[in-house]
Amino acid sequence: MPVNTARSLGDFLKSRRTRLDPASFGFSGRRRTPGLRREEVAQRANISPTWYTWLEQGRGGAPSAQVLDRVASALLLTDAEREHLFMLGLGRPPEVRYKSVKNVSPRLQRLLDLLDASPALIRTATWDIVAWNRAAAVVLTDYAALPPSQRNILYFLFRDPAARAKQHDWESVARFVVGGFRADVARAGLASEVGELVDELCRVSPEFDALWRDNEVVGHGDGDNVKRLRHPELGAIELEYSAFSVDGRPDLSMIVYNPLDDKIAERIRALAARGE
């Protein structure tokens, strides 16, 4: 680890350590300086006092991600502070922590609703849809009509005949979706969380079972980023889509589909307004 980086890491650890109240952790005794002692942080992090002392002194080389995680917990770091700790210690952010989501903030929902001609939705790392706008409901799927357990992109792509019929090239879309889903789940470390969904789809859909066994992986930048649909009212339409991480929630993605034709945009706007 470079000397300047090691010094910054040590200064950061010391600043977080000295702000904590020893009494709140059951530590007592007279103290000449505020906060926890180094050996107390080491005890809470289940690492050796010597190793923790070396971290603050910039010695001993780069720590492991497991050590940094334990130190972050011991020092009660926020998510932002934990990320900063990893950047100082390893030169990279920590792996994304998945959080169960049932809905989004009113601020984020208002942002979706402003996109009156562009279908937009919020997707979790396991591809559950947790928020959407009216345009998404009328163009893609009426998610509100589905039970929460079925608001998953893979679920209705492989089990909803209406969703399947809308796809211009269902086979290509299905292959792309399964590959992207596999990549996102692995990146978030959520293989066990989606096991039940994967098992069910393998059981009821031979097509999903075959694609899943292919073990293909695709990235968000792969493909032409254009979704082609056969809509029952709008006819054949093309939507250019982009995915964005949600501020402060890297496990959530906002996907926006922009119509490539101004006339289609106006018709989507009118269709969404009619359903309000």
Image (spheres, helix red, strand yellow):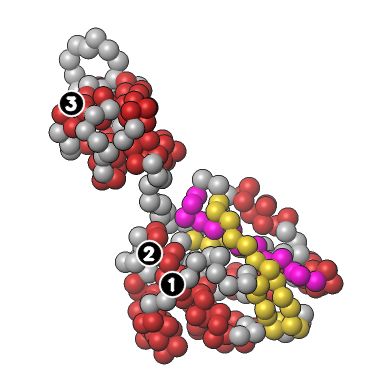
Residue 254 lies left or right of residue 78; in this view the side is right
Name which residue type carries label 1.
Val
Specify the label residue 39 is tagged with.
3
Q: Is residue 85 visible?
A: no
**Discs 1/3, front:** 1
Tag 1 secondary structure: loop
Q: Is residue 253 visible?
A: yes
Determine whether 190 is above or below 165 in the image: above
Determine whether 32 is above or below 108 in the image: above
- Give the quarter of the image for residue 57: top left
Answer with mark 1 or mark 2, whichever residue precedes in sequence: 2
Circles 1 and 3: CB atoms closer than 8 Å: no
Name which residue type carries label 3.
Glu
Is 14 magenta? The answer is no
Residue 47 lies left or right of residue 109; in this view the side is left
Residue 160: x and y, percent? 54, 83
Residue numbers of the magenta segment: 249-261
Residue 268: x and y, percent? 77, 71
In the image, what residue occupies the spot 65% across and 75% down? 227
Q: Which residue is mark 2?
A: 186
Answer with mark 3 or mark 2, whichever residue precedes in sequence: 3
- Give the quarter of the image for residue 47: top left
Determine whether 224 is above or below 233 in the image: above
Q: Residue furthest front?
A: 2
